[in-house]
C-alpha cells in the first residue's frame, strides 16, 4: 500500500511510523523545497515504551506534480489550510482517490465527505509533538476509525496494520466521533493560555475547576444537539465527565492530576510556540459556540474562554496563571 501524507506535523509523522510496516511506499507532501524531510529521506518516531527513536525511510515532495497516484492520502493539516490542500489533492488525483482525515474539529467531516467519494476519518486520541522537523514523539496510543464506504478495504487494511500497536476503535458515524473529540479539545485553549506544558503543577485545583466547567458545558450542548456518544478507547466517557461535576474535588482531583501528567503539549499550544499566530480556535471553540447558540444555550465559561483567547492572542499571548484566567472568565460572564 502506497500512502501519501499531506503535512509533516507530529500526528502524521507518528501515524506514518505506526503504519510503516504495512506500507510499500511512504510519502509526504511538505510546504517548501527546503523541508528537511526532502533532504533526509527519512523520519524518526519515539512511541510509548520506547527508549530510543525508530527510523523510517520516506520520500518527500514540495509539490504533487509528477507524484504517482497513492492508494491513500492522509490529510494532516490544520483546518485553516484544508481548502487549499483539498484543491491540490483533487487537481492531482481526482475525487475518487481515497482520503483519510486526522483533523480536529467537526466541519472537515462534511467538507471532505462532499468532495471525495471514499472518505475515511481517524479520530486521534493520542498526543504527539515534534522534537525536530523530522522527528516526533507519541504520548498514548489510541485511535478511532470510520469510513463513508461500508466494508472499506483500505479501512480494513489500516486497522489490521495498527492493531497490536495501539488501541483501534471502529465507529459508525464520524460526526459523532468528531463531536465527542470536540468537547475534549475545548480544553486546548485553556491549557494553551496558561502555558500548562511549561507549568504542569501550577494551581491544579483551579485548572481542574475550569476544566470541569468547560467540558460539562460541552456535554450539555452535545446532548441537546442529539449527538450520540462514541465509545472510543482512551477518551473520557460522558459519565466520567459528569462525575467531575457531581463528585467532590477531593476525589476527582487526584485522577485529574494523573491524567494531566500524561499530557504533552497540545496542537494549539504548538502553534503558539511556533509563532504561527493562527490556531484551531475557530474550528474547535468557535464551532462549539455556534452549536450552543443554535440551541439557545448558556455556556458562560466556554464563551468567555473563546473571547478571552482571541483578545489574548492578539495582544501578544503572554501566559496567564489559572487564577488570573478564572478571574477574567468570571468578569466576562458578568458583562
Image (cartoon, helix red, strand yellow):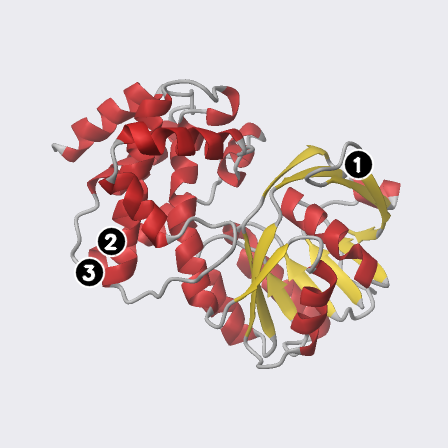
As drawn, the label of residue 295 is 3
Name the residue: 41% across, 34% down: 255
- Mark 3 to mark 1: distance in Å? 48 Å
Residue at the left extreme of this rendering: 334
x, y percent for residue 201: 45, 19
Callout in the foreground (3, 2): 2
Could one spot residue 82 in this view of the protein? yes
To which quarter of the image does residue 335 belong?
top left
User: In percent of the image, x 58 and y 72: which residue is there?
Assistant: 119
Task: Residue at 50% x, 75% y: name it.
Answer: 114
Give the answer, above or below, for where 86 lies relative to 240: below
**In front: label 3 or label 1:** 1
Point out residue 117 in the picture as x, y percentages from the top left corner: 59, 79
Residue at 33% in and 52% down: 239
Residue 178 picture location, percent across and down = 45, 59
In-front residue for pair 327/167: 167
| Mark 3 / mark 2, whichever is N-terminal | 2
Q: In the figure, is residue 160 to the left or right of 78?
A: right
The 10 Å Cα crowd at callout 2, few under 14, some 14 to 19, many 20 or more, is some
Name the residue carrying label 1.
53
Please report whichever mark, 3 or 1, sits nearer to the chain's N-terminal start.
1
Amino acid at each position: 500500500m502506497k500512502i501519501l501524507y499531506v503535512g509533516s506535523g507530529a500526528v502524521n509523522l507518528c501515524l506514518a511510523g505506526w503504519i510503516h510496516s504495512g506500507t510499500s511506499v511512504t510519502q509526504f507532501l511538505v510546504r517548501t523545497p527546503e523541508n528537511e524531510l526532502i533532504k533526509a529521506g527519512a523520519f524518526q518516531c519515539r512511541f510509548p515504551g520506547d527508549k530510543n527513536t525508530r527510523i523510517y525511510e520516506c520520500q518527500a515532495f514540495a509539490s504533487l506534480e509528477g507524484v504517482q497516484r497513492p492508494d491513500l492520502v492522509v490529510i494532516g493539516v490544520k483546518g485553516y489550510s484544508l481548502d487549499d490542500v483539498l484543491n491540490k489533492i483533487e487537481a492531482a488525483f481526482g475525487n475518487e482517490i481515497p482520503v483519510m482525515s486526522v483533523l480536529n474539529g467537526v466541519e472537515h467531516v462534511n467538507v471532505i465527505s462532499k468532495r471525495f467519494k471514499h472518505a475515511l476519518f481517524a479520530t486521534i486520541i493520542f498526543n504527539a509533538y515534534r522534537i525536530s522537523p523530522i522527528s516526533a514523539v507519541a504520548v498514548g496510543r489510541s485511535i478511532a476509525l470510520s469510513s463513508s464506504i461500508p466494508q472499506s478495504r483500505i479501512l480494513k487494511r489500516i486497522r489490521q496494520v495498527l492493531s497490536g500497536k495501539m488501541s483501534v476503535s471502529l465507529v459508525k458515524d464520524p460526526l459523532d466521533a468528531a463531536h465527542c473529540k470536540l468537547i475534549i479539545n475545548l480544553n486546548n485553549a485553556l491549557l494553551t493560555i496558561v502555558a500548562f506544558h511549561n507549568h504542569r503543577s501550577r494551581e491544579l485545583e483551579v485548572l481542574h475547576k475550569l476544566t470541569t466547567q468547560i467540558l460539562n458545558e460541552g456535554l450539555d450542548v452535545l446532548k441537546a444537539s442529539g449527538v450520540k456518544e462514541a465509545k472510543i478507547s482512551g477518551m473520557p466517557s460522558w459519565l466520567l465527565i459528569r462525575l467531575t461535576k457531581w463528585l467532590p474535588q477531593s476525589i476527582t482531583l487526584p485522577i485529574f492530576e494523573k491524567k494531566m501528567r500524561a499530557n504533552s503539549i497540545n496542537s494549539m499550544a504548538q502553534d503558539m510556540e511556533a509563532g504561527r499566530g493562527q490556531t484551531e480556535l475557530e474550528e474547535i471553540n468557535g464551532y462549539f459556540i455556534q452549536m450552543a447558540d443554535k440551541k439557545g444555550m448558556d455556556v458562560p465559561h466556554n464563551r468567555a474562554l473563546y473571547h478571552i483567547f482571541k483578545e489574548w492572542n492578539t495582544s501578544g499571548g503572554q501566559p496567564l496563571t489559572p487564577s488570573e484566567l478564572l478571574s477574567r472568565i468570571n468578569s466576562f460572564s458578568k458583562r
